[in-house]
Amino acid sequence: MPQYAIFFGGILMLIGAVGYAYGIAMGSASLTALIPSAIGVLLFGLGFTARQNEGPRRHIMHAAVVVAIFGLGAMVGRLISKRDAITGSAGDIATILTAIVCLIFVILSVRTFMSARAERIR
């Protein structure tokens, strides 16, 4: 499970970095383009920490899922607030990609939690 957080954290950092670099190239860079990277850094850090610490791993991974849920909520909220003005711009694409990555991470995490719980019950 920590490998999921590390992997998806890396993808989110890449989305943010590419979005910001694109903004620089177009002459309209904004720090908000780095929001996916901030979420990614948190997920990556939590995944790395969970991989190194066996004892609190479950709690750390639950924290990673909470970060992803907040990231998903923020991106969906942004898309809903712009629903009439979504143009397919780089910012819109980064927002959609970030929401998808967070959603996939949450789904995989919940499935892993459910499997682990079923194993403990047996």
Image (spheres, grey):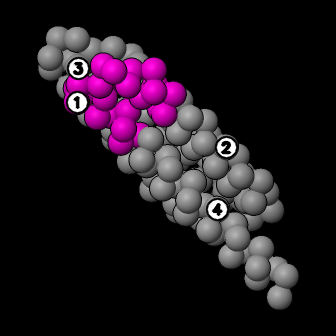
Q: What element carries label 4?
A: helix
| Residue at the spot of label 4 | 110
Alpha carbon separation for disc pair 4 and 1 = 31 Å
Q: What element carries label 1?
A: loop
Magenta segment's dominant SS is helix
Q: From the viewer's perspective, is 89 left or right of 104?
A: left
As rendered, which of 37 and 65 lies closer to the eye?
Answer: 65
Dot 4 or dot 3: first in sequence order is: 3
Residue 114 circle label:
none
Whole-percent x and y of residue 108? 55, 63
Q: Which residue is drawn at 63% across and 69% down?
A: 112
Q: Is mark 3 on a helix, strand or loop?
A: helix
Quarter in which the N terminus is drawn: bottom right
Q: Is mark 2 on a helix, strand or loop?
A: helix
Q: Residue 94, relative to residue 87: is it above or below? A: below
* Residue extending farthest right: 121
Marks 1 and 3 in Cβ contact (< 8 Å): no
Residue 66 circle label:
2
Marks 2 and 1 in Cβ contact (< 8 Å): no
Dot 2 amino acid type: Val
Q: Can residue 27 be seen in this view?
A: yes
Residue 23 circle label:
3
Dot 2 or dot 1: first in sequence order is: 2
Dot 3 amino acid type: Gly
Alpha carbon separation for disc pair 2 and 3 = 29 Å
